[in-house]
Structure formats: structure tokens, C-alpha cells
Amino acid sequence: MKPVLVIAFGLLSIFLGYKIYQSINAPIEFNKIRKERFSQVIAKLKDIRDSQEAYKTVNGRYAGDFNSLIQFIDTGSYTITSQKDSSFMRFDKTYQIELQQDTIIIDTLGQVKVKDSLFGADNRYKTMMDVPFAQNGEKFEMKAAIIDKSGYKAPVFEAKVKKNVVLYDQPKDLLDRENSHQSVEEVNGTEIKVGSLTDVSTNGNWPPIYDRKNN
């Protein structure tokens, strides 16, 4: 029986050693994969935000769907203007003298294509609705609305995706921990998103590390 016990204990030691290695290595690999995938997802959300801000500049509201947003980028233009302070003299009937009046002169210089301004020769905006690493071709969920803020009708938008979609193949315990984050150094909650349907904001819910150029 002794050789059998030696083999059995040997196999048990190997198994336990592997489990210990996995318990240490799995979170490291998870964090590496998470950062890589979140970086690409956030890059697309930034493109969506830039496109929406351009849309609002021209149309006074945000686009409610990606088809409208992409069509706008394909065909839309900015009007380029310059403004300068000026003044002139105007006769004041009350004081019966000429008084200086301040004004602003706005000149229209021309137009520039939205696509050229935001993306140049890059056509990545045509697929900005596609979620990177999504197993089943999931798209970002995007909505736009007009909300009342202290009597002011404010246009808002929100684009988001569930973390579960991006990290679909990761260990459940680590994914559950990720979804419960509430920290200034993490992407909080169960979603990665930009904008808000309840507040006048175009911020994302990711930490500053994802805004660094090397990311």
C-alpha cells in the first residue's frame, strides 16, 4: 500500500499546488484582460460622446440612434465663425449726447466637415455601435432625451454596455466582484457608460487611468 499512498499524496500535492497557483494567478490575469477590454470599450464610448457633442452643436439636441449619428458624421458640417469686440457711437435721446455702445461682431469664415474634424480619414465611426469583444455581436445601448432642470429644457444622452457582455468568458466570482465595485479607482457598477439621462453630463463612469494616452 505504501507506493499507492505515495502516489496518491503526490497527486494530491500537485492538485493543491495547482489550485493555490490558480487562486493567485487568476485575479492577475483577470485584471490584465479587464484593463485591455475596458480600454477599447471606453475608446468607443469617447467616439460616441465626441460625435454626440458635434451633433448637438449643429442640431441643438442629441441623436437618439446610431443611424442618425453616423449619417450626420457622413454629411454634417460645422460653421466656422470668429468674433471680436467692437464699439460705436449712438445718440442718446435722454442725455442728448452721443454715447459709446459696446457690441460683438461675428463673422462667418466658412464650413468644415464633421467627419474631417473628428475622424479625419478614419472610418471607425461607422462601427462605433459595436461592443468590442462581445461574444454575440452586442451593440451599445444608446438613448437621448430632453429633461427639465430647474425650468430649463436640457438635452441629454447616455450610451452604455453591461460589463458581463465585455467579460463574458471570465470567472464568475471575479466578475461578481467587478460588478460590485464602488471606488474612484474603478469603473463602478455593472455597466460601462458615458452621459446620463437624469443629469446634464457627458462624463463617463471610468477612472482617470483610462484617459491617459498610453491607454
Image: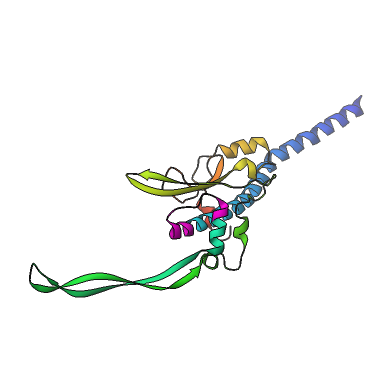
The residue at the point 55 percent across, 46 percent down is 160
Q: How many marks?
A: 0
Q: Is residue 61 magenta?
A: yes
Residue 117 lies left or right of residue 102; in this view the side is: right
Q: Quadrant of the N terminus?
A: top right
Q: As rendered, which of 84 and 170 lies closer to the eye?
A: 84
Residue 42 appears in the picture as rendered: no
Expressed as whole percent of the image width and height from the top left, the position of residue 129 reads 60, 52
Expressed as whole percent of the image width and height from the top left, the position of residue 18 reads 76, 38
Q: Which residues are magenta?
A: 53-68
The residue at the point 74 percent across, 36 percent down is 19
The residue at the point 7 percent across, 69 percent down is 95
Image vertical order of residue 14 relative to residue 62, above or below: above
Q: Quadrant of the C terminus?
A: bottom right
Expressed as whole percent of the image width and height from the top left, the position of residue 200 reads 41, 48
Task: Identify the residue at the far top of this view.
Answer: 1
Q: Quadrant of residue 192?
A: top right
Q: Is residue 47 magenta?
A: no
Expressed as whole percent of the image width and height from the top left, the position of residue 191 reads 56, 42
User: Which coloring applies here?
Assistant: rainbow
Residue 197 appears in the picture as rendered: yes
Residue 157 lies left or right of residue 18; in this view the side is: left
